[in-house]
Image (cartoon, grey):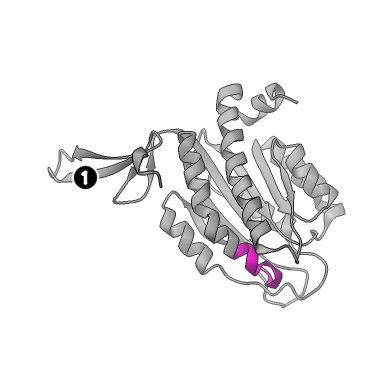
Amino acid sequence: MNRNLVNLVDSEDKEDNEAQKSLVIGGTVVSSGSGQFIGGNIVDIVFVFDTTGSMDDKISALLLTCTSFVDETNKMNLNPQFTLISFGDLSVPYGGDKIEVVVPPTSDIEIIKNGLRYIPRNKGFGNNGESVLEAIDMAFNIQYRDEAVKVMLVVTDEPAHNVEAKVGRIIATMKDRGFLVFVVATDEFYYHAMAEKNGGFWWEIGPDTKLDEILKRFREMARKVSLVVDDVYRLGEGDVKTYLLNAPK
C-alpha cells in the first residue's frame, strides 16, 4: 500500500467518547476496526470459482492477487463488496462435488483472504466439463446492495455442462439483471459471449497454464474491472444497461 495515500483520521464516538480510527485510501475511508469501506461508488463483485483439482494454481494466484482488486477499486474511489462461490462437477451422481457460497457478501478484506485459503476443493472427476452455469445461477441469487454496480467474475479451466439447455438463458439473465461479466476460462464461444455481451473481457486459461501467466491475467482483470465500473458511473450514471448503450465500441 502506498503510504502517501494513507492518513489516520480520528473520529469521536459521541456515545462512548472513545476515539475511532479510520484509514483514508485513495479517497475511500476504510475502518481500521472492521476493515470495511465507507463512501465511494458502490460495486458488488462475485467470484464464481472452479475449485477442482486442476485449479490449484489458479486458487493460489487469486489469493496472491486479491489485494489487487482492493487496490484498484481504491484508485477509482469505489466502495467494494465481495462474494466467493466455489463449484465443481455436479454431473456425477453421488460424487460429492458441490456449489457453495464460501464467503457471503463482505467488505472485510481478511475474510476474503481466509475464504480463499480454506476454499472447499471439489473433485472434478477427470471428465470434460464442470457445473459452471449452475454456479452462475447461484450467483444470481446473492443479495446485492441497492444501487450497486454488480460484477461477476467467472474463473474455470474447463468447458461448461448443459450448454445447449442453459447458456442462452444464463447470458440473457446476466444482461437483464445488469451484470458486468469478466471471464477467465477456456476458449469456448459462450465464455466469450458472456463477457462481450455484458461489458466485460475474456482471458484464456487452461489446465496447463503456468502460474506466472495466471497472475498476469488476474492482475489485468483487477485493473479492468475497476476501470469499467468507473466508466459505468461516468457514462451510465451507475446503471450498466445505460452504460452499454453509451459505451465506446
| Residue 219 inside the magenta-drawn segment | no
User: x, y percentage for residue 71?
Assistant: 47, 44
Locate residue 156: give its quadrant. bottom right
Residue 22 in the image: x percent, y percent? 28, 43
Location of the C terminus (image quadrant)? top right
Q: Residue furthest right?
A: 164
Give the quarter of the image for residue 233.
Answer: top right
Over which residues does the magenta segment extend? 52-59
Q: Does 233 sit above or below residue 113? A: above
Q: Is residue 56 magenta?
A: yes
Closer to the camera in the image, 132 or 62: 62
Magenta residues: mostly which secondary structure? helix
Residue drawn at x 45%, y 39% as measured from the top left: 74
Q: Amino acid at mark 1?
A: Gln
Answer few, some or many: residues within 10 Å of disc 1's Cα (few below 14, many 20 plus, some between 14 and 19).
Answer: few
Residue 227 shows in this picture? yes
| Residue sitting at x 62%, y 52% | 218
Determine whether, in the image, residue 224 is placed left or right of residue 184: left
Q: Residue at x 39, y 44 (%)?
A: 2
Direction left: furthest residue: 17
Measuring from the top left, give residue 192's x and y in whole percent: 79, 45
Give the labeled residue for mark 1: 20
Of helix, strand and loop, which one carries label 1? strand
Asked if 174 appears above or below 90 in the picture, the reply is above
